[in-house]
Image (tube, rainbow, N blue to C red):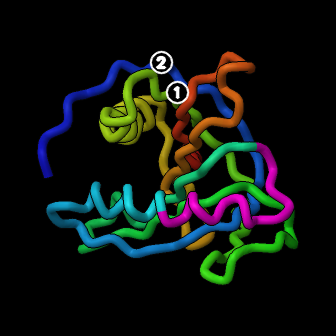
Amino acid sequence: MERLQPAAIEAPRFEERPWTFAGLRRRHARKEGVWNALDEHWCAASERFAKVGGRKGGAGYGLYYDLFAQRDGFEMIAAVATDDEARRPAAFEQLQVPSRRYAVFAHLGPVSRLRSTIWTAWYGWLPNLGLRSAGDSLTPDFIEVYGDDAGNTGRPAIEVWFPVRA
């Protein structure tokens, strides 16, 4: 993997909440071309987002599991937030993420620099704040949030939510 330049990011805000998602899960190998595979994954999922019933808001979510583990791959779920019993396409799964405390970082640049924001938050901000991951088998390492009327609320178009504990 190429060396990432640190991103200029602001201190996080903190929120606590549970989530319910419907999304398309895929395992991705850590190899050349993984970023193209993630783009294809997003495209395949987003084409089906409109078929999800009980959708909450207009945001898209990327849930990442095992990204920071020293394994040969990681899982990503491209999803939308839903009601508990949402109707969904056959390839989509329903996911309940229990209530956790999140450190929420705004991504302030182009999407091509998002990985720098993630790495700066994970390896810089969170340890310096004395926080560790609260991710587990039910809770992802982090959640990317794309959109949801950011232009009307003043929020950035992309945020990264890290489940944390002291």
Q: Residue at x 67, y 44 (%)?
A: 59
Badge 1 is on which residue?
A: 106
Callout 1: SS? strand
In the rendered view, does 41 fall on the left or right side of 70? right
Most foreground residue, 148 or 21: 148
Instruction: Please tell me which residue lies in front, 81 or 117.
Output: 81
CB under 8 Å between callouts 1 and 2? yes
The amino acid beneath tag 1 is Ala
- Residue shown at 19% from the left, 37% from the top: 4
3D distance between C-alphas at marks 1 and 2 = 7 Å
Residue 138 found in image quarter: bottom right
The percent position of residue 144, horizontal first and vertical second, equals: 53, 46
Rendering quarter of residue 52: bottom right
Task: Say which quarter of the image contains residue 114.
Answer: top left
Q: Earlier in the sequence, mark 1 or mark 2?
A: 2
Given residues 50 and 133, the one toward you in this image is 50
Image position of 98 (left or right of 120): right
117 part of magenta stretch: no
Dot 2 alpha-carbon crowd within 10 angstroms: few under 14, some 14 to 19, many 20 or more: few
Q: Is residue 108 above or below residue 97?
A: above
67 or 58: which is nearer to us?
Answer: 58
Region in magenta = 44-57
Q: Residue furthest bottom?
A: 90
User: Which residue is under mark 2?
Assistant: 10
Task: Say above or below: 150 vs 56.
Answer: above
Residue type at mark 2: give it: Glu
